[in-house]
Image: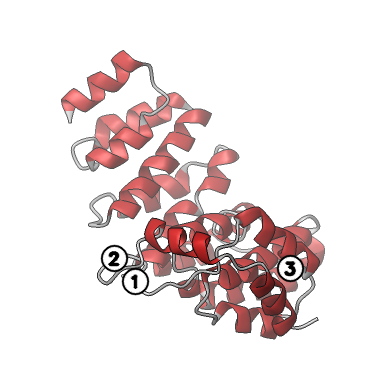
Amino acid sequence: MTSQDVINNLQLLANKEKAELCKRFFKTLKGQYSEGDLFLGINVPIVKEIAKKYKDLELNHIETLLNSPMHEIRQCALAILVIQFERLAKKAEENEEKLRLLLSFYLSHSTKANNWDLVDMSAPKILGRWLVLNLDSKTEKLKIMNSLAESKNLWQERISVVACQTPIKEKDFSWILTFGTKQIKHSHDLMHKALGWMLREMGKMDKEVLLSYLEEHYKDLSRTSLRYSIERFEKSEREYWLKRK
């Protein structure tokens, strides 16, 4: 079971027409956020099925996949990492060192998750899952999150926000309130969308917390973040906040 086996499997499924569509959808032209990314044209569910087949792939082979210029090959590598991390997290106390190894590997290769879909499929299930595990101190977790949030790399910054989804689901809003606010004046629309999405997720769990946050920060939120965050509100309530903005 090697990285080349994975690559061979994926290349057999390549679809040139779909690959061209992906290049346009993921903004790969010069100056766009995903400039130069290359695609095989394979649907995500199929990539994930390949990942299941190679779920025990060793890290050195996963690293080879992450270094590929092809989007779906990197995607498959991240899907394998997610499978491995989730499996170990089921018995976290018995697998502390292995979990830390996978987390460290993910973080050291986090710039390879260099598109919004790659961040969104991996950050909540690896870094986000780690945030809710009782394995390391809050100080250590804050150190890692701050490193990502202050990296000046769009994808690492997005990881620091989207990872908050997992704590949010357990009604721990401290991470998004801290690291979402750090990115509130970010220049990129992908960050505005990520923040608005996470605020909306927080609102699903506790609307009053979201309303309190909006009251304090709506002047600083981009219109995109605000729109995303209030998407589930009644029409009249959405109009109220948008008029205030």
Residue at x-position 61% and y-position 68%: 14
- Name the outermost residue toward the front: 17
**Are the two marked residues, 1 and 3, in contact with CB atoms closer than 8 angstroms?**
no
Task: Please name which of the two marks, 1 or 3, marks the residue nearer to the observer.
Answer: 1
Residue 92, quarter of the rendered image = bottom right
Q: CA distance from mark 1 to mark 3?
A: 38 Å
Amino acid tagged 2: Gln
Which circle's residue, 1 or 3, is located before the other in the chain? 1
Amino acid tagged 3: Glu
**Are the two marked residues, 1 and 2, in contact with CB atoms closer than 8 angstroms?**
yes
What secondary structure is marked by label 3? helix
Q: Which residue is mark 2?
A: 32
Q: Which residue is mark 1?
A: 35
Q: CA distance from mark 1 to mark 2?
A: 5 Å
What secondary structure is marked by label 2? loop
Q: Which residue is mark 3?
A: 96
Which circle's residue, 2 or 3, is located before the other in the chain? 2
The answer to whether 121 appears left or right of 85 in the picture is: left
Residue at x-position 57% and y-position 72%: 74
Label 2 Cα crowd, 10 Å radius (few <14 / some 14-19 / many 20+): few
Vertically, is 230 above or below 180?
Answer: above
Residue at x-position 54% and y-position 80%: 68
Q: CA distance from mark 2 to mark 3?
A: 40 Å
Residue at x-position 72% and y-position 73%: 9
- Name the outermost residue toward the top: 236
Q: Nearer the viewer, residue 72 or 114?
A: 72
Amino acid tagged 1: Glu
Residue 51, quarter of the rendered image = bottom right
What secondary structure is marked by label 1? loop
Vertically, is 223 above or below 9?
Answer: above
Q: Quadrant of the N terminus?
A: bottom right
